[in-house]
Image (tube, rainbow, N blue to C red):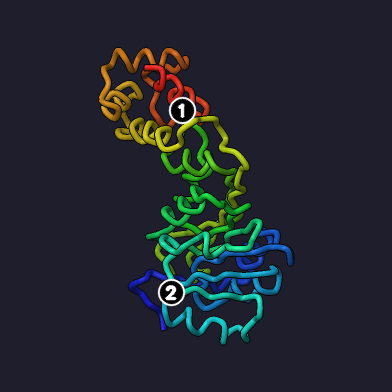
Amino acid sequence: MIRRVLAQHFLLDRGILHQIILAADLSKNDTVIEVGSGRGVVTRELVKKAGRVVAIEVDRELARSLSERLGHPPNLTVLEGDARTVDLDQTVCQADSFKVVGNLPYYAANPIIRRFLEAYTKPALMVVMVQKEVAEAMVAAPGKMRILSVGVQFYGVPRIVCIVPPGAFKPVPKVSSAVMRIDLLTQPSVQVDNVEQFFSLVQAGFIAPRKQLRNSLAMGLGLSSKVVDNLLESCHIVPQRRPETLTLEEWACLYRSRQDV
């Protein structure tokens, strides 16, 4: 039975499945957390390739029937729960490192990705299915950056593995999807001493993304235009630029300059 209230779309395309497994670069030494195991199409391949698979499924009926459907593989653990709230430390206990693979529900993709990126124990890499527009935002270069772009690229190196047409799923969604691979960095891509304050600055800058950066920052930080102009000048950033044009290093420079005000 399909729980439409959960907006689940089950992958049918074997070619896309192959690309997901290939992108995850699996070995018997790997522990994999699978988010959204559904009917087990991807799970079946994961348990063949990885040493241990922990499948997180929010649908009670699908979670309870998954192991039986796959023939009770000994390296599979099924957790019924929401990946946005499940205890990650408990999930990956005894694992020196782990990978994340998942067909993420559109409504929860951003918070799930953010949760793994910001976790104390981070995955080595993530291979996830998301809406095409979300994938494009993750890999965006300066000129088309969004908060999501900054957030993902702060912690890792994202790339689009392939675009997935609606017909690859049942039921058929209304939009195209994409398989993303995010390789997590051992250290953030830019150096800041307080990550929370750094992202508060970025959020302030994007409070009015179509406005000039001077106006967005003044509005978001509650500062005068003169103070903001001084911040921008210290980083050699033209005040008329828009937030979507900034590089991560320019955001980091603004953060460091802000600490001196």
Location of residue 112 (image quadrant): bottom left
Where residue 193 is drawn, which disc sits there? none
Quadrant occupied by the C terminus:
top left
Q: Give the distance between the C-alpha atoms of the residues marked 2 and 1, in whole angstroms.
A: 41 Å
Say which amino acid is labelled 2. Pro
Look at mark 1 in the image and give the residue it sits on. Answer: 251
Q: Nearer the viewer, residue 58 or 237?
A: 58
**Sequence-earlier tag: 2 or 1:** 2
Amino acid type at mark 1: Trp
Front-most of residues 90 and 34:
90
Task: Give the residue pinned by disc 2.
Answer: 171
As displayed, is residue 161 above or below residue 71? above
In which quadrant of the rendered image does the N terminus lie? bottom left
Check if mark 2's residue and mark 1's residue have beta carbons within 8 Å: no
Q: Position of residue 133 (x, y in %)?
A: 45, 50
On the image, the x and y values in percent for residue 161 come to 61, 54
On the picture, is 208 further left or further right than 62? left
* Corner quadrant of residue 260: top left
Image position, residue 22 (x, y; %): 69, 61
Judged from this view, the residue extending furthest toward the right is: 28
